[in-house]
Amino acid sequence: MGQSQSLDDRCCPFLKTKDQKSDSKNEHKPSKPPEPHVGPITGGSVVSPGAAATAQDALPSTVPNDGNYEEAIRTFKKVAELDNDGWKLEKASHLLEKLEELKGVLDLVNIIPPPGGQIIDVTLKVIKAALGLYVNMKNCYGLAGQAATVAELVLRYRESLAGKEGLVKERFEQVLKVIKKVEAYVVCFSQSDGVSKMKQALRVITAKSTCEALSADLISAMTDLKDATHLDMHEGIQALANRAFEADAEEARVASAVKDAEEECGGIDGLADRLTQDDEYREKLFQQIYKSGGTRLVANLQSILLEKVDEIKKIVEGPATNIRHPLLKSFWTEHFRGKISVDWGTFWDAFPNRLKENAPNKSELVQLLHQQQNREAFQVAIEDGRNISGVSVDELSAHFVEDTNLLTEAKALVLEGMHRITAAASCRVHRPVDHFRGRSKELQDVRTFLESDDPPDRFLVISGDIGQGKAELAYKGCEEAVRVGLFPGGTFQVFEDMIVAGPDVFVSGFLDAFGCPAGQPPGMEALRTRLNELANAAGRQQRMLLLIDHADKVLQHVGGKEKLDELLKLALRKLPGLKVIITCRKDPALTLSEQYPPKLVYLRGGLGLKESVEVLETLCPALVRGRDQYRQTLEDVASKVDGVPRMLLLVGLYLNRKEPQRLPEELRTVASSFVNIESDGGFQSLIAAQVFKAVMALSDEERQNLFCLCLFPSTFTEEAAEKVLDAADRLTGLDRLRKAGLVRCPSEATYEVQVVIRNGCRAMLENSAMLRDLKLDYKVLMDDAQRFLLEYACQLQSISFEKYITSAATAFRLAQKEKHNIEQALRLPKLFSELTAQLQMKGWPSELSKACCDPLVGMVMQLPIMNVYDAYSVKAITKELGKVFRHLKHQAGQVACTVVQSLCRLQIGDAKCMDIDYREKVHFLPAMYLITSGDELSIYCTTCTHVPK
């Protein structure tokens, strides 16, 4: 083998060898190579003593003497004895330099038997790599010390190990294999490219267990070697076993998640590659790690992935001939230099931070485009509304002209993008039902109001008795107006579910409609900020529309009228182009009427006979085929229900479930079952009875699915239904319910159980007399509800993972699709309790109780730190949950509700009004730190004096 490669090729950059100095010192000194006891092994054969002498004669004069061997052994021993705290750079560097001076000892194959020379060489590499570390230092130093101990043993027993074959050689080679594994592990932490940094971050999580495994392999290999040679290595092997390793950077759950992922991807290399290439897998794993408590790991990996972007910045060579604006031209020349497609991640990583320093208004441009919401709007504007992930350089530069200031143009694009986001992602007004008929005069009045540009025409009230179709009239008028482009600024709707809890929560309903500003907690201040954003983005005179359906629900609360008045005045003042439609049973007589006199549309009576018959025929197509046969009976039915649209809907839904041959008989039965009832209470009872008939007309399977879908508070997506129904055949049942008219599609890709049906079904679950007639499988229903709850517990966790809603589009999506469902999941335990009481069960099934309560605790603890739910809503939710947790004697749940309610009381300013029970339990909350684990919840608080038992 002869002399090894130059030390300059093998040393760390910051280490300098003393080879030349050492050679000069030894140049005139005679060398006395030791006499080998056994001929050296070359190519697997034993060399004769004569050949060995010839080899020795050929050695350079710098070959060390026996004293050098002993010095090498002593130096290795010093390295091996260094404990973790003793690995100071200066001391370790000095020892390494000393070993380099003795390199002739370490490289002579006729002195150190194979694979001893390789073991020594690998050990040197391990030590050098360990010296350059700033990550996982102590653990790698520990492994380096163990490698040095092995090398020291190899040197000490070199004579006895030389020339051995068979089992000894096999055991010796096993030691080399383990030392190489140690080298691969330590070297990983001395590399600095993007993927290696990712490997470092992943390996640190499992550092202790990995190092202990490598150490155990090393001890095992050396023990086997000792047993095979019968050498007295006990003391040295004991020194290996005495090494302790530092604890992992994250707790065991995180380490377990990373190990599982590593096994799934076939090793650390496969995992690192997949994280850089597979966005879906990366998001899934990050969420899993985050839930396990690996916040720091996720942050480190995200940072490393951003650094990785630098590697693709200068992909294509070529002149930037297609760039028109000079500042963009210089930017592209430096970073892209070609006619390529723009990857937005890469773009934002470089722009505008690296524009030329002398660019005008650079600091303002940087500040503008450092905000996530502005970046998103800019990107939407550049993409011209197309649903694509990137644009070409030509398309990007086309938005800038040479004589335009870049800052001015960027601001304009941000405003344009914000307008598009608002228009595209706002909570659009629902579509009208397919069976809408009649109301031509009233519909024309709505059209006139929506088309008018007169300043006073800002406020319309549609009123009428229950079931007359006020909401559907508003939906129909809005649909026509949107279709012809009357409201380019966006259409918004405050949903019924957000106004039933009282005027305080009504603010949250407005924020759901308009969108909550990123990073700002819900409340009046957030609403003002959002309205200002809309005004600036869309232009103050941009036409917009706001619909508030079922306003009676908020007006019936104390202070509800005043709060509605306040919110509408604010919206109309901030957005001069906004029009408002309210539906309620009578004119609310708001004080804003003095400034904005309302247009009144009052629905008197039901539909005419012709329109009523058309409604029934639309809902039950089989009636059309026997129109002449059924005409008189249909008119009789319409007359009996006074043409009230809601009653016509229920009758039509009931008839649509009957066999065509039974329709004549069913029609006569329906006609004879109605009597004209004038009182509101009697009418409500009639509606409830008709809902029951419509539901009972379903098959048992369809009824089961319908009640499951009624768990959703309002609209739901197909994805949400898949989570809850959890079976392909049940999803086909969803489509059957839609075709039957019980489920409708109020907007694209969303579903909703007809409001009157949903409300009626929820009421039936609270009626013990009806429950038995429904023939429901309550276990299936409660399993569905449990699945619903657990899925949205997971959804809530993923929202927090998105850093509390940092973009406008995410906030809108949440308000439209997920927020109400999460809130409903939190209210489900109350429904469970009511069901068990109605069914005279002793309590929840134990497995259901355990499975639901623990995730609920986590959900409760997430609510206060989310910029999604206002304090009033959280307070109402936790009040309901607290009763359930107390009934179930779930200690962690009781504590969580107590703490969160108290925090909400502080946030809404009524801390002084806290009842004595809460004041006893929690005195001071801002400094609290909460940890949940199973049934245990510990509260660390500066002055927390009591935790409920």
Image: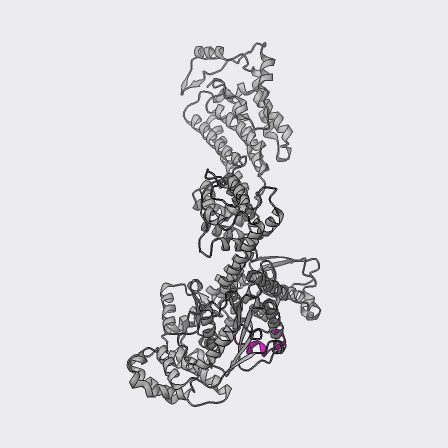
Q: Give the extent of the magenta segment.
A: 549-563
Q: Is residue 402 above or below residue 10?
A: below
Q: Tell me the residue at 63%/66% (across/down).
A: 524
Of the pair 16 and 812, the residue shown nearer to us: 812
- Residue 137: image quadrant is top right
Taking the spot 37% from the left edge, 76% from the top edge, the residue there is: 698
Most extreme residue toward the front is: 403
* Number of marks in picture: 0
Q: Is residue 948 at all visible to an observer of this figure?
A: no
Q: Is residue 382 visible?
A: yes
Residue 557 included in the magenta stretch of the image? yes
Whether residue 631 sits left or right of residue 290 in the image: it is: left
Q: Quadrant of the C terminus?
A: bottom right
Q: Is residue 363 magenta?
A: no
Question: On screen, 109 above or below 585?
Answer: above
**Residue 179 screen position, x and y as percent:** 49, 31
Residue 661 at what x, y percent from top left? 28, 81
Residue 661 horizontal side relative to residue 679, left or right: left
